Amino acid sequence: MTVETLSRPSSSSPLSVNHQLSLVVDLDERGSFRAHVENALGRSIYEFSNEDPETGHPDADGLWLVEFGFMRHARDTDGLLDYLQSMGIVGASATLVIQE
């Protein structure tokens, strides 16, 4: 089982400031992968991982977004953006780039 967390913007944050989102990879080593998506204000709006929440070990099934075909690989920004838009997490005009 992989982990994902959704953080809704607070009511005080302007939603239309900038639709530029960044994919930030927090960990990618020894089979573990953890990343989050930040909005233009630097706030995390979505987090995902292939780590088991109880043990912290990589899940044998891998990253569920890849396993179920939403993303081609862990850094697939197009697939992740399509998923976030289809779930109503971000708007249709949002863009997503990987932060290096």
Image: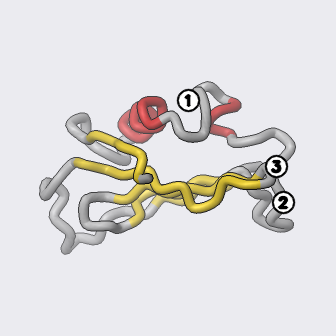
Name the spot of residue 73 as percent of width and height, x first.
61, 33
Residues 12 and 75: in front is 75
Q: Which mark is residue 100?
A: none
Which residue matches tag 1? Answer: 70
Dot 1: element: loop
Dot 2: element: loop
Residue lying at the far bottom in this picture: please name it. Answer: 12
Classify residue 65 as left or right of residue 85.
right
Q: Residue at x 25, y 41 (%)?
A: 94
First along the sequence among labels 1 and 2: 2
Name the spot of residue 2 as percent of width and height, x first.
71, 50
Q: How far apart, in angstroms, are the residues tagged by discs 1 and 2?
A: 23 Å
Name the spot of residue 76 as percent of width and height, x first.
51, 34
Q: Residue at x 76, y 64 (%)?
A: 53
Q: Which mark is residue 59?
A: 3
* Residue type for callout 2: His
* Residue type for callout 1: Phe
Q: Residue at x 60, y 40 (%)?
A: 74
Mark 2 Cα shell of 10 Å, populated few (<14), some (14-19), many (≥20):
few
Residues 99 and 21: in front is 99
Which residue matches tag 2? Answer: 57
* Residue type for callout 3: Asp
Residue 63's place in the image compared with 10, above or below, is above
Q: How far apart, in angstroms, are the residues tagged by discs 1 and 3?
A: 18 Å
Q: Quadrant of residue 39?
A: bottom left
Q: How far apart, in angstroms, are the residues tagged by discs 3 and 2?
A: 6 Å
First along the sequence among labels 1 and 3: 3
How many numbered marks does the figure carry?
3
